[in-house]
Image: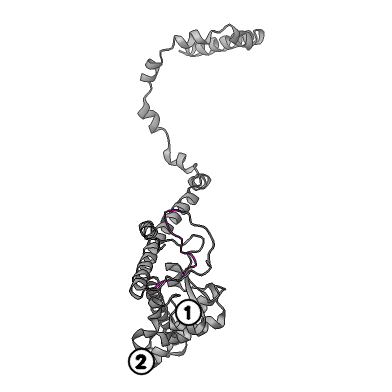
Amino acid sequence: MAASAEGPGLIGRMAGAVTGRVVDVVPPEVILDHLDLDAFLDRIDINHLLDRIDVERLLARVDLNALLSDVQLAELVRRAGIPELVAETSGQLAGGVLDSARRQLVGVDTLLERIFIRAVRRRPPDPVAPAVVPGSRSSHREQVSGRFAGAASRAVAAGVDLGVILMSYSALVGLTEFVGQALFDVSVRGASGIVAAIALGAWAVVYIVTATTITGRTVGKALVGLKIVSRDTSPLRPGAAALRALTFPFSTALLGLGLLPILTSSRHRALHDVLAGTVVVYDWGDRPAELPAPLTAYLRRRNVA
């Protein structure tokens, strides 16, 4: 048993020694030159070889978790530019939906203006110099950037601003209540209706003056695509912004008679616009304000666009 166990080891060592001597004597390049690889590969039955491979057993030995852990997915996604692509696509989609809604409001403004013009038989107003200069990207739509904003767009913007004022005021009251109770054991919930109304009005003035002084527009006007400028289309000054906000109640007095000129006057200026020397124009930022294409085609056919 011992001899037979040692036999293969001895033979193996002898064969290795002989092979090593042959390799030392014969260069490997000579052996490769005399080896016909094409003939060797032709004698291999690839299909038979593949049939003998146990694919399931091979996959079972692969640790997918370890393999995936070595893959830096975040870096791969970043290098592929997927975040930028998603952001650009989302921005274009949101901008397209917003611009579509804005165009509908501009269309309603235009129709209301044309109806009033035909009713009183006067000429349509000449547009002011555009506050935003970029050219129209579509020949199928009439550009209205810098033109005086109509009643529908301004009404929607005012509704949005009213919601923003009420929500922000409620949040401010809640914060004041929390701080007063925590630090001074004082509650503001018991304030009278008059005090609450004054506080709400003061907050509305602060909101409107701050927003229009900094950007020329409130949240509602920014969403709808409107901007407040001086009568000569120069940027709004802080004094004019404050005067416009403080005189707004005069426009709403007597059942809103001061707001009626938005529909009837050539420049769509309410009473507080006249007192403050301001106008409201269409301004969509880096994109031109436009009419809907069907309305543009109709107005062109009527030679009134």
Residue topped by disc 1? 208
Quadrant for residue 43, please give it: top left
Q: Is residue 150 above or below residue 240?
A: above
Residue located 33% across and 86% down the image: 255
- Spatial separation of the CA atoms under disc 1 and disc 2: 22 Å
Q: In this view, does 297 lie above or below 38?
A: below
Q: Is residue 202 above or below residue 92?
A: below
Residue located 51% across and 60% down the image: 286
- Which quadrant would the N terminus be assigned to in this image? top left
**Which region shows up in magenta?**
138-152
Predominant SS along the magenta part: loop
Q: Which amino acid does label 2 sit on?
A: Gly
Circle 2 — which element? helix
Residue topped by disc 2? 193
> Residue 60 location in percent, x, y?
38, 33
How many neighbours does mark 2 have within 10 angstroms: few (below 14), some (14-19), or many (20 or more)? few
> Residue 163 location in percent, x, y?
38, 76
- Residue closest to the far top: 34
Circle 1 — which element? helix
> Residue 264 location in percent, x, y?
39, 77
